[in-house]
Image (spheres, rainbow, N blue to C red):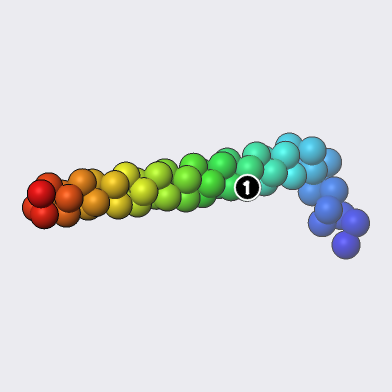
Amino acid sequence: MADFWAMGGYAAYVWSAFGLSIGALVVLLAASWWSARRRAAELERWRRRVEGAERG
């Protein structure tokens, strides 16, 4: 099992690549989530504005 984790001497490269990839995916997920929330809030503001204009 130790040989697997050592990756034949390339463990530093392999595990750092996995770590960077997972980090990039987490950053992309957080950015997408934040953007979706911001767009939903913007859409709600526009809806309220349109509803107010239709009533007034």
**Picture quarter containing residue 1?**
bottom right
Which residue occupies 79% across, 48% down?
Answer: 7
Q: Residue furthest front?
A: 56
Q: Residue furthest right?
A: 2
Q: Residues within 10 Å of mark 1 (few under 14, many from 20)?
A: few
Query: In the image, 47: left or right of 39?
Result: left
Residue under pointer 1: 22
| Amino acid found under the numbered disc labelled 1 | Ile
Write the residue at 29% across / 47% down: 45
- Relative image position of residue 40 (x, y in whole percent): 35, 51
Residue 1, placed above or below residue 34: below
Is there any visible trace of residue 24 in the rendered image?
yes
Q: Secondary structure at mark 1?
A: helix
Name the quadrant containing residue 24: top right
Q: Which of the two residues, 25 or 32, is positioned nearer the viewer here?
A: 32
Q: Residue at x 82, y 56 (%)?
A: 4
Q: Nearer the viewer, residue 41 or 17?
A: 41
From the viewer's side, name the closer residue of 8 and 5. 5
Query: Residue 43 vs residue 13: left or right?
Result: left
Q: How many marks?
A: 1
